[in-house]
Amino acid sequence: MLVAMRKPRSLLRPTIHGGGQARVSALGEAVQRAIRPLPIMRLLDEAPRAIAKVFGSDVCSIYLREARDVLVLRGNVGFPDTALGHVRLALGEGIVGTAVEVMKPISLATAGAHRSYRHFPGLGEERFPVFCAVPLLGAHGPLGALSVQRRGKEAYSDADVELLVALSGVLSLRIMHSEQEDLTQERRRVRRAPMKRHITLPGSPVVHGVGIGALHMLDRPSGLGASAAIPGDAARLERAFAIARRRVEKLHLRAKHIGADTLPFVTFRQIVDDARLRERTGELLDSGMPLRSALHTVAREAVRAGQRDAFMAARARDIEDFVDAVTMLSQYDARERLPAKPVLVVDDFGLFELLVAPQAPIAACIVRRSAEDPRRRSLLSLLNAPVLSDVAGLFRWAEAGDVAIVDAVHGLVVLNPSRSEVSALRVRARKKK
């Protein structure tokens, strides 16, 4: 009598992976986050956290390739937020730059021993020597790099490297498609309305935070104005000097309160109280010269006097800034109304911008030039708003009145953001409350 052989239960029942398998669950979460149509800011926040969880890593970083083939740290978990936008590598520089240059993954157990290792003071990167970096590949070359780091002595396994390469492919697709999806959503929203350019521009965070508002371009006054003196010029001049003095005093107190550098205000107060400066402007007014022309003449004289030495040149620039500010303040009643909580856009930031910046709260400030100078950074801190500097291409793409998200954490300006990006910003703001 033949007895039918029964198959073992293990062969009859399929294995459902995920429950109790932390790595499989984390990998599913990372892929899910990477394929969702997230705004670029949320992607840079959430992807590093999810990928670090997959590998049990202390650090996960996303570098984006930007102008002049520079790799900039834009997304990270494990390092201070101050590293975002400031850690920069050329192609071939550091382990990450080398991985992008050769278009191959690089892994090692002791990153500091690698000949290409680049140390960044203040990051504490030496605590996480186990390192793996893979390039983010795009249709026309590398988009950037993805790296993970952890404590210990054992290098990432071959399986880890293969998995990181696979995740980098998913992340690359999201980065390439993020702007296209935002444009599609914007077209749906505006329908037949004129299309405004949606673009994300990189910069360097100066004062951390995120703000949204309409762009207000803060331009310098031109030398053009009335062809002759008009009644009331002397009164307008006195009023402008009085406003400037009050603002310098108020800002000086604020600098003391927040612990900012107060040394520039010694010079500022000397200029505001310079009797000869006011007398010279008054002499030109009495001779029949219009107010704006008189002020510009005084500024030119200060610049010529400042050619003697470096100290005088710096003081001359401050006097020129002050005279331009007085020119603007003397015409304040003719200035256009500002939008509520604007995003202030300036070419540089000195005494002029400090005095004529809106006194009401602003949403953020964008400075086209670099703000590495300690004095400039200190003055920008007095705005009490997020600040982003070194934003290349801003004046080519932006127009006054355009709405912008200034992300002075990752170091990005999003011009004419989509609804999804605005919604993500509001969600982030609610979570912080």
Image (cartoon, rainbow, N blue to C red):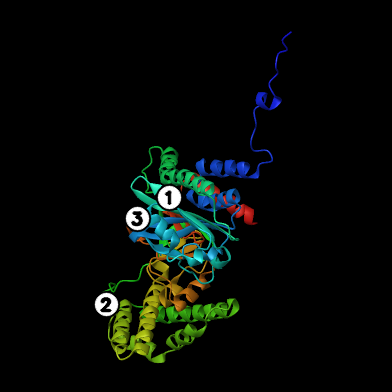
Image quarter of the N terminus = top right
For the residues marked 2 and 1, what is the alpha-carbon distance in whole angstroms? 63 Å
Of the numbered discs 1 and 3, the one sitting upstream in the chain is: 1
The percent position of residue 59, horizontal first and vertical second, equals 56, 58
Local crowd at mark 3 within 10 Å, few (<14), some, or many (≥20)?
Answer: some
- Disc number placed over residue 397 in the picture, else none: 3
Q: Which amino acid lies under the numbered mark 1 shown in the image of this protein?
A: Leu
Which amino acid, mark 2?
Answer: Ala
What number of labels is visible?
Answer: 3
Residues 369 and 297: in front is: 369
Q: Nearer the viewer, mark 2 or mark 1?
A: 1
**Nearer the observer, 283 or 345:** 345
Q: Amino acid at mark 3?
A: Trp
Q: Quickly name the residue at label 1.
A: 136
Q: Residue furthest top?
A: 1
Kindly identify which residue carries mark 2.
228
Pair 1/3: label in front: 1
| N-term mark: 2 or 1 | 1
